[in-house]
Amino acid sequence: MTSVLELRGLAIRAPKGILVNGVDVSVYAGQVTALCGPSGAGKSLTARACMGVLDVVPGLFGGSLRFPALSSRDWFEGVVGKGRRAQAALLRETESLRGGYLSYSPQAASSALNPGRTIGRQMEMALARREKRVDPADVGVHIRELLDEVGLQPYVASSLPGELSGGMCQRAALAIAIAPDPRVLLADEPETGLDPVLRRQIVELLVQVGKAHNSGILLISHHEDTVERIADHVLRLTPVHPGGGE
Amino acid sequence: MIPRKLAIALGVACLLVLIGLGVFAPAHLSEFDSDRVYLGALDAPPFGTDQRGRPLLEYAQQGASVVLFPSLFAGMVVGGMGVVGGLLRCVGSARVDTAVQAFGEIVGSLPRMVVILVVALLIPAGSRGLLPLAFAWAVLASPGAMDEAASVAERLGGARFVEALRAHGFSWSRVFLYHIVLLNLRPVVVRQAAETAMQVTFLEIALSYLAAQENQSSFTHADNVKSWADLLEIGYPSLVLDVPTGHALALGLGLVAVVTVMSLMLASAARAR
């Protein structure tokens, strides 16, 4: 098993109290690691810590984050417990990883798809972040392949997000997330707001597509049945502080 | 809906017409010429003459010079405030939202025309001009622009949208300037700016028309300068009396139409895609 992300001893504190304490997460290439637990358990905070986009204000966090497929150093090093400045430093530090090594499929596709740009243009921007440069002449082919992979017709490339249904938006968001061929695909409750049939389809599609690209998938979900069915590794979080967390 | 390229072409063409008129405006009207009184557009091209034989083109040019800079400036102020309102909503801070809401409620509750008249009266007679009035109008209009832009930002997802874009690896400047302002706030901001520019032009015409009717100096320009309101004032009697000034009325209304078309076309051109 090749580890692509290792988070050790994550602790996140806010003025109200401790939000996350001592969480360890490992994500492996081609496998699904699920983070589950009730609301307020810190699932989304943990996911944001993995992406380096924590928004705890004024945030205080500790632990170590490593991307073994990239380097052996700790990405949290030097920014532990310094609040807003540390948050800004971490954002800068991890910026080059996001959208390339690390990709994100959000809770609601509507908040990840830019309503002012066509799906095809957004996929182009995601393709540009591939480690292996895509020939501009082949961009159209790659877009059609990716859309086909997530079960969408080629015409979707020229559509604005507002012209698509909820399920199609979710598929388009997945196509954009997978476009840069990420080592880690972070899916934050991708089934939110979908009916049970579509929910199952989207999650299975996510796993299928992620594995086809040999990406390690970090799936956040509060649907135990989904997690039990598809995850290779399951991490259950419990709330540390009442009312804190997400 | 009008095709985007056509809307851009029409909007820019109208803007260029106004800039062309304003930039080449003469400082003073031509001398009295009793042989050319009330000539029509065919006899004294391009727009005919007034009751003293002076070309109406000079009225159009001077009127454009009066409204051009203040109306564009007011549009930019409102557009800028709209951008600020949208971006502040994306910050996701309750304190900032409260401050913006308080600003909107206080400024939005002020009676706009009363404030404009107070500002107009506060300006010394020797330094009258449209610019302070345009600025006051822009400040009074800005809560609406900020509120609308904030609603767009809210629909995008506010701070969540910013976070999702950050998660996709975009820098702060790319997230805020490109994804939020250029792609999403642009339609609202440009429309609000274009509307404000149009409103300031209409404000100038209204104030100057009232002043001309009362034989008083206008709040918006010096006495030696003519406004588009003077064209309407010269031309209006042709509707009710047997006075040959219909060409002045047509020119005045035509210039108002140019400003209206410019505003509508620029707003239309700024729509998404």
Image (cartoon, grey):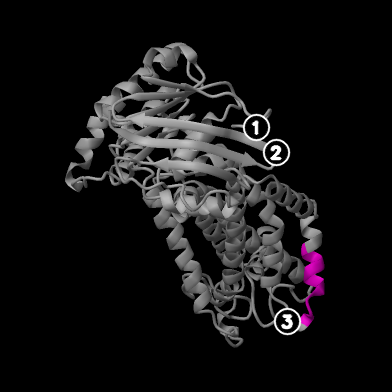
- Percent across and percent down for residue B148 are 62, 45
Q: Of discs 2 and 3, which sits in the foreground?
A: 2
Point 49% across, 46% down: residue: B184
Give the structural element (helix, strand or loop) at label 2. loop
A108 left or right of B218?
A: left
Quarter location, residue B122: bottom right
Residues beneath discs 2 and 1 located on the same chain: yes
For residue B52, side relative to residue A111 (left or right): right
Let me know if residue B157 appears in the view: no
Residue in the picture at 67% in, 49% down: B144
Looking at the picture, which amino acid does disc 2 mark?
A: Lys
Percent of width and height locating residue B19? 49, 71
Q: Taking A208 as reference, is A233 left or right?
A: right
- In which quadrant will I find the N terminus of chain A? top left
Dot 2 falls on which chain?
A
Dot 3: element: helix
3D distance between C-alphas at marks 2 and 3: 57 Å
Which circle's residue, 2 or 1, is located before the other in the chain? 2
Q: Kindly identify which residue carries mark 2.
A: A16
Kindly indicate whether the residue at mark 1 contacts the one at mark 2 (C-beta within 8 angstroms): yes
Label 2: few (<14), some (14–19) or many (≥20) C-alpha neighbours in 10 Å: few
- The secondary structure that dominates the magenta segment is helix
Q: Which residue is mark 1?
A: A244
User: Label 1 lies in what chain?
Assistant: A
Residue closest to the eye, A159 or A187: A187
Q: Are marks 3 and 1 on the same chain?
A: no
Residue A246, image x and y in percent? 59, 32
Q: Label 1 is placed on what type of residue?
A: Gly
Magenta residue span? B116-125
Q: Which residue is mark 3?
A: B127
